[in-house]
Amino acid sequence: MTIDTPVARFLLLLGLGFFFGLAFEEFYASAKQTRPGGVRTFPMLALIGALLYRLDPARLLPLSVGLLVLGGWLACYYWRHVGEIDAEGRPNVGLMVPLCNVLAYLIGPVVLAEPPWIAVGITVSGVLLLTARERLHGFARHIESGEILTAGKFLVLSGLVLPLLPDQPLTSLTDITPHQVWLAVLAVCTVSYASYLLQRYVAPAGAGLWVALLGGLYSSTATTIVLARHARAEPSALRHAQTGIILATAVMYLRLLIIIGIFNRSLALGLAPMLLGLSASGLAIAGLWYWITGAQTDHGSSVRRSSNPLELGTALVFAGFFVLISVVSAWARSQYGVTGVYLLAAIVGVSDIDPFVLSLAEHATGDMPVSVGMTAILIATSSNNLLKAGYTVAFAGGRSGLAPAAALGLLAAGGLGVAAWLANFPVPI
């Protein structure tokens, strides 16, 4: 029996109504007031909703009348009990009880009219929102108003600005379109913003390694500088800082692979074994170093988290770099061929490599061979690792920064070795 048979949908309807009612009754078990709904009422509401839907599935007139009747009764209940005080001494003005009853009523029509996953998803979401009241209210009290504004900015940048930008090149200097430029900005900002939120609200306080791991998704260069300074300022946290520097670079390879995959699947598939191998090597080196230095006293003190990555100025600067590097890459290839692209890759490694990597991901879809893009990206990451090794020694001090700098040097050497092999023996994609 499949889930699309009438019997299966009928059983699913009853099961979801019973599950929702059970969660409702359990949540309000300690309440002194009698509340409409529960393990019997919700399956009954779901059955009634399904029956009324079946009577007129085209115009939904019986279902609408039933919804109005249920809403009127719930309005009377709410008006009668709105002035009461609940068990916690707060006014009984919440709308969760009426809303849960309406949702239980609509489960029936949804099970009959939509794919099963929609009904299951709606019911589970309703249960989670009902039972997670304290956690959600605590989160709302904990979050800053600036974070809400930032989330609004992200929605504007992705849902409003992106669709309005033209998807045609504006200049003959590059075939990159404004839509592609802004899409690249959003791709990097999304990964960075997710990392920022995890660092701020999920990573445990004082978990330096977690912050370093997530910092690699944000910016391995910025994370390296922060941790190197932290190692010098707090010698007790040296072990975590040194390991975190290596971890951030190991995660950088994964971040680049994700971003490349958004724009160029063939390039991402070609780079996957190399970037995953370098990432695994970095994780192994970090784990080995953490184990070797395990005898040291380390309090794992907290590390300053990254700043919010969704500032408009930062996004515009990134867009500018992306366009500039795209133009320079096209010029270098036309004037100096593949050698010019490789030289540019080594140069941009001393700065933010994301615009260069994304530019290669876009150009590799055209006249640039995929193997050339793979080699150039490996050169850029290796150059960036050498830069971070220099930052580590400079900000952490000679002895404190020597071990992580050596690890970054090994990863750079590995990347350059693979790049040299690719340049001589291109891999067909």
Image (cartoon, rainbow, N blue to C red):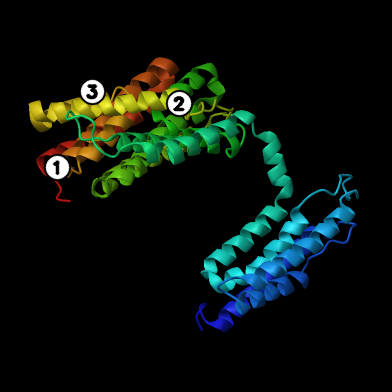
Q: Which mark sits nearer the N-terminus, 3 or 1?
A: 3
- Provide residue 2's location: percent of width, then percent of height: 50, 80
Residue 204 location, quadrant: top right
Q: CA distance from mark 2 to mark 3?
A: 26 Å
Q: Which disc number belongs to residue 347?
A: 3
Report the side of 181 relative to 204 (left or right).
Answer: left
- Provide residue 212's location: percent of width, then percent of height: 48, 33
Report the side of 122 relative to 105 (left or right).
Answer: left
Contact between marks 3 and 1 (CB within 8 A): the answer is no
Mark 3 Cα shell of 10 Å, populated few (<14), some (14-19), many (≥20): some
Q: Secondary structure at mark 3?
A: helix
Identity, as a three-letter code, of the amino acid under mark 1: Pro
- Provide residue 242's location: percent of width, then percent of height: 45, 28
Q: Which mark sits nearer the N-terminus, 2 or 1?
A: 2
Contact between marks 2 and 1 (CB within 8 A): the answer is no
Identity, as a three-letter code, of the amino acid under mark 2: Leu
Mark 2 Cα shell of 10 Å, populated few (<14), some (14-19), many (≥20): few
Instruction: From the viewer's side, name the closer residue of 19 and 410.
Output: 19
Instruction: From the viewer's side, name the closer residue of 39 and 387.
Output: 39
Q: Residue at x 20, y 38 (%)?
A: 363
Above or below, comparing residue 414 to residue 125 in the picture? above
Asked whether the viewer can see residue 276, the reply is no
Residue 419 location, quadrant: top left
Q: Which disc number belongs to residue 369?
A: 1
- Provide residue 338's location: percent of width, then percent of height: 11, 33
Asked whether the viewer can see residue 115, the reply is yes
Identity, as a three-letter code, of the amino acid under mark 3: Ile
Report the side of 295 relative to 281 (left or right).
Answer: right
Residue matched to label 2: 312
Instruction: From the viewer's side, name the closer residue of 304 and 54.
Output: 54
Above or below, comparing residue 37 to residue 415 in the picture? below
